[in-house]
């Protein structure tokens, strides 16, 4: 029996176990992928730590990893020719696998499935292994000249802030003369700054983070201004914002952290301003009710992205309009790198590259 390397969870709050397991066989409508690269997200560590236990049921031992790029190894017998998938093709995985029956799935938002759907790496076995099986309709074929280690993060770190920025644009919060902020310049925020420039309609882009090193990445990716709120009062942040932009408030905020950043964002939000939250480092958010009602301020969550959102991200990435801050890592170092991710020590995205 053919074997593969895999990093598996055997329980919560335990390191991944590096071991050899059988290579899975694809079902009739599935494709077996040889994983080329898999991004490492803070949510992978949160999964291991038990953060998602209320909503995600795992059967141990379990293989995490949801940001996946790889090559087609074998195609199931009932995969239609119209899918255009052949051995060797470079593909990425659309991670939201709905059951196809609920309203959200029929709207195309399978990542929000309220039926029996799920997400690869949070139920179906993920990409912290050399091979993984994927339903053919959740694969997107890409140009073989692109690097898998750049493609893999686009399926979450690149996708999630894109959908969030689209929500701000659709709500009319972007445009010339406005200020848009990206708060939290981690794996998601480094892409979020770029979308603020690409979709912002000329809005001034401000990056906020408590790390000067991460703010430097934001500046490289097009942020007009950067602010480090560490050890600053609200009035001091407002004063710095006023000095940089000529205004003490912000029209649109993409929050990629989900911590105390939400409280600061709510305080900085302009009347009729909007804030979209995609970060999940905390567990709850509290906003001042009167200022949100009286100023007609607006808040929305935004979760991952759908198949069409991902095709748009890939279309932007193909001609080089999206830039990456990627650090390749080795399989043997996965636990050490996950711990660094949990501490917030990672700039950009770590990507496990299978040799």
Image: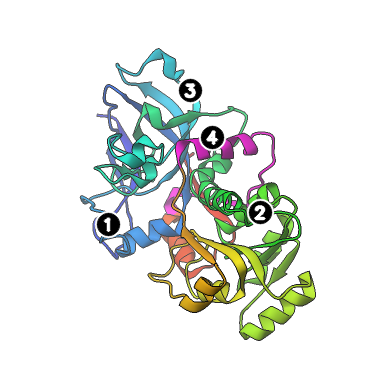
Which label was assigned to residue 88?
3
- Residue depicted at x 39% and y 71%: 284
49 sits to left or right of 237: left
Does the CB distance between marks 3 and 2 fall below 8 Å? no
N-term-proximal mark, 3 vs 2: 3
- Residue depicted at x 55% and y 67%: 297
N-term-proximal mark, 3 vs 1: 1
Does the CB distance between marks 2 and 4 fall below 8 Å? no
- Residue depicted at x 63% and y 78%: 229
Which label was assigned to residue 311?
4
Quote the CA–CA distance across marks 1 and 2: 31 Å
Does the CB distance between marks 4 and 1 fall below 8 Å? no
Q: Secondary structure at mark 1?
A: loop
Q: Mark 1 Cα within 10 Å, few/some/many (few <14, many 20+)? A: few
Quote the CA–CA distance across marks 4 and 1: 27 Å
N-term-proximal mark, 1 vs 2: 1
Q: Secondary structure at mark 2?
A: helix
Residue beneath disc 1: 55
Magenta part of the chain: 306-332
Residue beneath disc 2: 196
Quote the CA–CA distance across marks 3 and 2: 35 Å
N-term-proximal mark, 4 vs 1: 1
State which mark lies toward you, 3 or 4.
4
Name the residue furthest front. Answer: 294
Specify whether residue 203 is in view: yes
Q: Secondary structure at mark 4?
A: helix
| Residue placed most toward the observer, 292 or 308 | 292
Q: Position of residue 108 (x, y in %)?
A: 41, 36
Q: Mark 4 Cα within 10 Å, few/some/many (few <14, many 20+)? A: some
């Amino acid at each position: 029996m053919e074997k593969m390397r895999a990093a598996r969870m055997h329980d919560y709050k335990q390191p991944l176990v590096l071991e050899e397991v059988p290579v899975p066989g694809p079902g009739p409508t599935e494709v077996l992928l040889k994983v080329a690269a898999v991004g490492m997200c803070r949510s992978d560590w949160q999964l291991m730590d038990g953060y998602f236990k209320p909503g995600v049921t795992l059967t141990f031992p379990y293989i995490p990893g949801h940001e996946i790029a790889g090559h087609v190894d074998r195609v199931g017998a009932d995969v239609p020719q119209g899918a255009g998938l052949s051995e060797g093709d470079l593909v990425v995985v659309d991670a939201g696998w709905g059951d196809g029956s609920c309203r959200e799935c029929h709207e195309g938002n399978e990542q929000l499935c309220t039926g029996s759907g799920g997400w690869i790496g949070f139920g179906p076995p993920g990409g912290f292994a050399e091979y993984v099986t994927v339903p053919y309709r959740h694969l997107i074929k890409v140009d073989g000249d692109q690097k898998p280690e750049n493609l893999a993060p686009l399926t979450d770190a690149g996708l999630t802030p894109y959908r969030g920025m689209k929500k701000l644009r659709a709500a009319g919060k972007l445009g010339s003369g406005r200020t848009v902020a990206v708060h939290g310049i981690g794996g998601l925020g480094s892409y979020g700054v770029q979308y603020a420039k690409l979709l912002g309609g000329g809005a001034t882009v401000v990056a906020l983070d408590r790390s000067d090193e991460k703010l430097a990445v934001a500046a490289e990716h097009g942020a007009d201004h950067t602010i480090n709120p560490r050890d600053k009062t609200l009035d001091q942040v407002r004063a710095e914002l006023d000095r940089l932009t000529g205004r003490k408030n912000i029209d649109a905020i993409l929050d990629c952290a989900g911590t105390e950043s939400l409280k600061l964002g709510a305080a900085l939000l302009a009347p009729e301003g909007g804030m979209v939250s995609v970060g999940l480092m905390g567990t709850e958010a509290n906003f001042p009710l009167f200022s949100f009602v009286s100023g007609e301020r607006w808040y929305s969550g935004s979760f991952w992205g759908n198949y069409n959102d991902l095709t748009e991200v890939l279309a932007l990435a193909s001609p080089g309009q999206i830039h990456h801050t990627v650090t390749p890592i080795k399989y043997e170092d996965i636990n050490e790198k996950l711990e660094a991710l949990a501490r917030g020590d990672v700039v950009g995205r770590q990507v496990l590259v299978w040799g």
